[in-house]
Image (spheres, grey):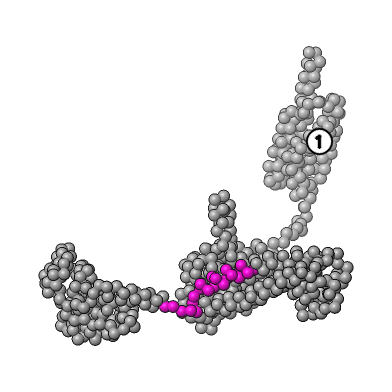
């Protein structure tokens, strides 16, 4: 059996002298405790030396990826024909078996054998000292590390992190310097601060004008608009500012030079940042813009770290303090962080900003991963995702939905909002149009028979007994009693409106009511409320009259008349009984 061992200097091939000891792998380390014992266990058969560092790096890079380098292939084909090869990497052993048809072994005993070879390597290979191996190992490891990084200057996001940090610092310093110029020169010409709003234009105007007395003789057309220039010249004549010396004016102009220089450098830095963002993260730049994308990368530390974040984290990145404060106080968590400054969220209405930020974060997370891990440099994913976010924004605002453009390479169908009431080819709306429904109209049916009054009277007869208690509370007792008698007699004519006998009956009832009225009027109205006994006869009348309405013919008329007469008598008796009880009660109270 042969053992293949890789060194920084080349490939070593050892012959195993005592293969029986490989069965006891747990005790194999004892065979390599000293150099003499190691020489009895293995013997160097052949050594393939690397010619230079490039060959060493090439071989090491192939072995790291479990591939068979060209030099090793020739070496094994020459030295290992018909032998069993012990190898540390099982994937490399499989590649050797497939290409060279050499039987390869990889197990626990082989791992112990390789460990022993490493410990006594300088003794087993003559001419290779330990102090020579150390610098070779260090140089090869550095070369291999640089190779594994796959260094590409176009994909270094460190420049973006530094550029956006410097841009933010420049904005702060520029704002501080501009405010200092306004405050300093405001002692001489205070009206200029309200006339010229832009900081750079203000600094250029101050540098050109100097003292305000020179404003009328100078041309500011290259700096200001005509209206602003004329207003400034008019204000310079009537200004209330104090006079300043020439020495003070020189210092003010030098500060204006600093403001102008910083603003110009900021413009150059922004152009540089835009070019770097388009090269490193083109899809993210399309989604949220150069500044917001650069701030997201700087906040995460790198583009790879940002790609590891889920969409929910990208959405609130930059609002960590608000998030943890909301979790601590059990309030609502923030809906957006740095992504709030993106143009798509700025276009949305305030009530839709949360929804659009969630959609934008989801699409931006896909774009970030495409930029960080994809090999292409095109912004096709970003353009397609931005179109979908804009379509969602239009849908929320209730506008007509257009077809979203997609890249020709994808070949995906155009996305439209689903509306079940919408025909194909028509733009989608937020809600379906309302249609007039004639079946929901409420109409009054015209009477088809000749007896509408009969139905109306029957309905009134059923409703009047229930309405009596409410009417009793608002009227005096004298009127209440007369109304009760009238209500008791009213249901009688409703049973048959067409018969002449009913008219006679009606006149009789009216006479009986007139006879009953004097008895009720003679008694004084009581102070207390009416007892329940006076109400029960009317309920009885209603109960007695209404069931008879369903009967027909002469039998029905006779029964109705009898019931009406009995109801009148019961009503009269009830009224007189109540009055007698009240009189007795009153007399007892007087005697007491």
Horizontal arrangement in the rendering, residue 270 relative to residue 256 (left or right): left
Magenta stretch, main secondary structure class: helix
Residue 482 in view of the camera = no
| Residue situated in front as seen by the camera: 115 or 407 | 115
Horizontal arrangement in the rendering, residue 440 relative to residue 117 (left or right): right
- Compared to residue 502, the image places residue 478 above or below, namely above
| Residue situated in front as seen by the camera: 554 or 433 | 433
Q: Pinpoint residue 111: horizontal percent, then vertical percent.
A: 22, 69
Residue lying at 56% horizontally and 56% vertically, measured from the top left: 321
Give the residue number, with chain letter if any, for mark 1. Answer: 474
* Residue at the far front in the pictured view: 247
Snapshot quadrant of residue 246: bottom right
Snapshot quadrant of residue 565: top right
Q: Pinpoint residue 188: horizontal percent, then vertical percent.
A: 81, 66
Q: Residues within 10 Å of mark 1 (few under 14, many from 20)?
A: few
* Residue at the far right in the pictured view: 238
Count of numbered labels shown in the rendering: 1
| Residue situated in front as seen by the camera: 336 or 124 | 124
Residue lying at 20% horizontally and 69% vertically, measured from the top left: 116
């Amino acid at each position: 059996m042969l053992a293949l061992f890789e060194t920084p200097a080349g490939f070593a091939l050892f012959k195993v002298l005592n293969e029986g000891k490989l069965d006891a792998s747990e005790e194999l380390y004892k065979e390599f405790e000293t150099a003499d014992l190691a020489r009895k266990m293995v013997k160097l058969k052949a050594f393939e030396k690397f010619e230079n560092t490039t060959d060493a790096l090439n071989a090491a890079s192939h072995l790291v990826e479990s591939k068979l380098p060209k030099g090793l292939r020739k070496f094994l084909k020459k030295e290992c024909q018909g032998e069993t090869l012990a190898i540390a990497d099982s994937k490399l052993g499989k590649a050797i078996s497939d290409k060279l048809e050499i039987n390869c072994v990889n197990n626990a005993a082989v791992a112990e054998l390789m460990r022993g070879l490493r410990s006594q390597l300088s003794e087993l290979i003559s001419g290779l000292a330990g102090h020579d191996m150390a610098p070779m190992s260090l140089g090869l490891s550095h070369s291999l590390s640089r190779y594994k990084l796959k260094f590409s200057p176009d994909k270094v996001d460190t420049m973006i992190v530094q550029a956006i940090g410097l841009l933010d610092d420049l904005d702060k310093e520029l704002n501080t310097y501009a405010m200092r110029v306004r405050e300093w020169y405001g002692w001489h010409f205070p009206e200029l601060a309200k006339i010229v709003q832009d900081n750079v234009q203000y600094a250029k105007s101050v540098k050109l004008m100097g003292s305000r007395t020179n404003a009328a003789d100078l041309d500011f057309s290259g700096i200001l608009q005509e209206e602003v220039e004329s207003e400034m010249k008019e204000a310079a004549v009537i200004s209330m500012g104090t006079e300043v010396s020439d020495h003070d004016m020189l210092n003010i102009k030098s500060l204006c030079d600093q403001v102008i220089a910083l603003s110009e450098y900021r413009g150059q830095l922004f152009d540089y940042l835009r070019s770097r963002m388009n090269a490193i993260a083109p899809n993210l730049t399309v989604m949220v813009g150069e500044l917001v994308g650069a701030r997201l990368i700087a906040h995460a530390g790198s583009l790879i770290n940002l790609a590891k974040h889920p969409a929910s984290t990208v959405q609130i990145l930059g609002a960590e303090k608000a998030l943890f404060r909301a979790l601590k106080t059990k309030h609502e968590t923030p809906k957006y962080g740095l992504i709030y400054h993106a143009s798509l969220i700025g276009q949305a209405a305030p009530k839709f900003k949360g929804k659009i930020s969630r959609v934008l974060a989801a699409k931006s997370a896909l774009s970030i991963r495409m930029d960080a891990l994809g090999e292409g440099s095109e912004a096709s994913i970003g353009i397609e995702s931005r179109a979908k976010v804009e379509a969602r924004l239009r849908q929320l605002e209730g506008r007509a939905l257009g077809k979203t453009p997609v890249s020709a390479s994808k070949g995906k169908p155009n996305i439209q909002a689903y509306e079940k009431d919408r025909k194909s080819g028509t733009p989608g709306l937020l809600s379906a149009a309302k249609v007039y429904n004639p079946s929901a109209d409420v109409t009054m049916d015209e009477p088809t028979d000749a007896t509408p009054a009969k139905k109306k009277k029957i309905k009134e007869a059923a409703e009047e007994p229930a309405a009596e208690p409410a009417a009793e509370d608002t009227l005096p007792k004298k009127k209440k009693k007369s109304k009760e008698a009238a209500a008791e007699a009213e249901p009688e004519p409703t049973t048959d409106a067409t018969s002449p006998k009913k008219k006679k009956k009606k006149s009789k009832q009216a006479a009986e009511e007139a006879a009953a009225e004097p008895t009720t009027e003679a008694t004084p109205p009581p102070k207390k409320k009416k007892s329940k006994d006076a109400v029960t006869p009317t309920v009885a009348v209603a109960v007695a009259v209404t069931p008879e309405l369903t009967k027909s013919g002469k039998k029905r008329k006779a029964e109705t008349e009898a019931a009406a007469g009995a109801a009148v008598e019961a009503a009269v008796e009830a009224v007189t009984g109540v009055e007698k009880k009240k009189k007795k009660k009153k007399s007892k109270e007087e005697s007491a």
